[in-house]
Amino acid sequence: MKAFFKGLAVGILSMMVFAAPGFAEDTIKVANAGALSGDLAPYGISALRGVEMAVEDINAKGGILGKKVELLAGDDVCKPEVAVNVATKLVSDGAQMIVGHVCSGATIAANKIYKDANIILISSSATNDDLTLSGEHPNFFRTISNDGAQAALMTAFAKNELKVKKVALIHDKGDYGKGQMELAKAEFDKMGGVDIVLFEGVTTGAMDYTAIVQKIKRSDAELVMWGGYHSDASKIIQMLKKKRVDTLFMGADGIYGDNLPNLAGKYAEGVYATGPNDTSSNPMHQALTKEHQKKYGEDPGTFFITGYTAMQALATAAEKAGTVDYDAMRAAMFEITVDSPMGQIGFDEKGDIVGAGFSVYRVMDGKYQQVN
Amino acid sequence: MRWIKISLGLAVIGIIGFFTVRELLMDPMYFFELFLGGLTRGSIYALIALGYTMVYGIIQLINFAHGEIYMIGAMTALIVASVLGMWGWNTAVIVILAFVFAIVYSCAYGFTVEKIAYKPLRNAPRLSALISAIGMSLFLQNYVMLAQTPDYLPFKSLIPDFKFWEPFVHIITSVEITIIVTTVIVMILLGLLIKFTRIGKAMRATAQDKVMAALLGINVNNVISATFVVGSATAAIGGVLIACHVGQINFYIGFLAGLKAFIAAVLGGIGSIPGAVLGSLVLGISESYFTGYFYSEYEDVFAFTILVIILIFRPSGILGRHDAQKV
């Protein structure tokens, strides 16, 4: 009996050992990593759905280099420490290209693993400037503009359209939020004419933000600019309105999407946010939106289109290079032009997207509507 | 050593006093608004801290699952309010039922947690019960996350904006007043309960000496259960009130709130009920001033710094008694 179990154990183990390389031969493994649970899950899930749909389309056309694409998924909850574990797991599972991660902090942490493993990483939502501009992440690309572009748009809009003289910059102390507000501060300093009356970080998930709201009120800021995500923004917006503080509120793509209006309800009316350009006039975009509605019964989330484009870019580069090896792939990434739902896009020498940008949106009747 | 402590203490008090007077004179209105904000926050801390301090007073256990009881209170109120709101019930009825259900559910959870996780370990080393408490906390958090959702949920305030209060609403909202008033009422009721009722007397006796109380015919197990139930009820009230104040909740709100309330209880002298209230108010108000006058970045750092400073001077908390070793 004992011998039987021993034999069984050996059998199972050897099956596992032989099974792994067996599959790797005839598929190309692409992994999607991002927050699929936790309060930032709506962002991660929207990107994943875009990638999934792109993989389906690619496989329907015969795959990449004649091989089917196999999609793996990893959930990092947008936490840097979890992201490193997810990255390690995806690499050991044999992922050859990665789409992700969703949050900038998680992406920066995880890319240490991908860089050492020589794997191309393309994100549909991580906007932190350092990822491309610092030069420390040569394997990184993205299908969304960087925070620098976003900050330039936000500050110009605040000064020229909203005509504010005093702003309060509040952030959540994270890589994404704090980085964004530092860029906004630099932009304001550069153009002059706008006073930064407050520059502060708050603790994410704190019990209440009454004290910081009172501080904003005393500073007489006409506009609160927020660097961070929607869950904390919603608390601050509600408290500002409940205390009858007369300011405008503006954030970046971290508060863009349906999540903020859903959470803050009527208090969210009039909130400004920047988000990826509205490309809904593009026929490919319209077809995808229809597909998404048919499949999930709802409108696509914030990073659905950029996620789809990211996967498309990887496929195009691999076809051009004729291989999925790192060096050839990377060289091809700089040369390709992708006919994407965002229009014709490519990548500059740092890995940032060319041919796409941000627009300003405003919450009206519980939904974000484009302003300019 | 003694002189160093005294002079250090005087220096700290001097600096704080100087700043307080200066800011008070410069902008009295802002000073007062921050005070009220801190008072609101401190009241919530106090409602949670009571549970920590009462349980510690009786069985010397730090009930780390207590923050989760507070979260469950808020969650229950949200579910009850949404269902009744959908049925189109009267607002006043919804408010009362939401509070009642939140309290009943939280009490049931508090009672059960004690029976499952702490009672079997009553005579085990204290560390075992502590680990059991942390396990219970993680279990409840994940249970609510899986049963409900990991996202933040909007919580429509149960307390309406009073019309007549509109001119003062920029200073203090009607929800904040409700929080402060409710806390005062709860404190008075609790004081009466402990001072004058049979169960209150039994609680005090058990806190003083468990074995002696048992010898005199007090059912110690019942007293401990009652303590958990009372603590859970106040935490549930705190949970519903803060949800009305902030407007959104998720499964994780109990962690930070519980931690802060625990600090407040230690600050005031864990085991002492007036101490927990005082510690909570000190913590809430000083956090509010720190954010208002310095940097909100370091709010949590500041909370722990106060704890360290006070414990240096009074190792058993502001109102904590320095018990002589039992012989």
Image: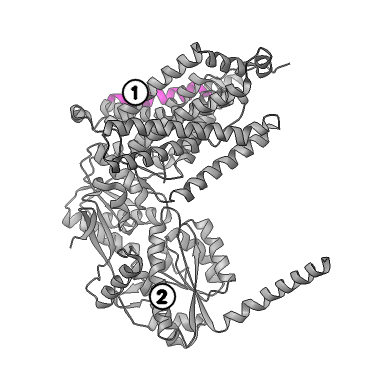
Q: Nearer the viewer, residue A270 or A151?
A: A270
Q: How many residues crowd mark 1 within 10 Å: few (<14), some (14–19), many (20+)?
A: some
Q: Secondary structure at mark 2?
A: helix
* Residue shown at the point (38%, 37%) measured from the top left: B77
Say whether residue A115 is left or right of residue B74.
right
Residue B285 position in % (x across, y down) = 39, 28
Q: Residue furthest front?
A: B87
Residue carrying label 2: A311
Q: Chain of mark 1?
A: B
Say whether residue B78 is left or right of residue A7.
left
Q: Secondary structure at mark 1?
A: helix
Residue carrying label 1: B181
Main SS class of the magenta portion in the image:
helix
On screen, residue A119 above or below A222: below
* Residue shown at the point (44%, 26%) measured from the top left: B282
On screen, residue A370 above or below B45: below
Locate the N terminus of chain B by quadrant. Answer: top right
Q: Nearer the viewer, residue A160 or A5?
A: A5
Q: Chain of mark 2?
A: A
Residue type pointed to by label 1: Val
Evaluate whether residue A191 shows in this view.
no
Question: What span is in magenta?
Answer: B8-25
Evaluate whether residue B12 shows in this view.
yes
Choose mark 1 or mark 2, whichever is in front.
1
Would residue B19 be counted in the magenta stretch? yes
Residue type pointed to by label 2: Met
Colour scheme employed for the rendering of this structure? one colour
Residue A129 position in % (x across, y down) = 38, 63
Would residue B185 be counted in the magenta stretch? no
Quarter of the view holding residue B247:
top left
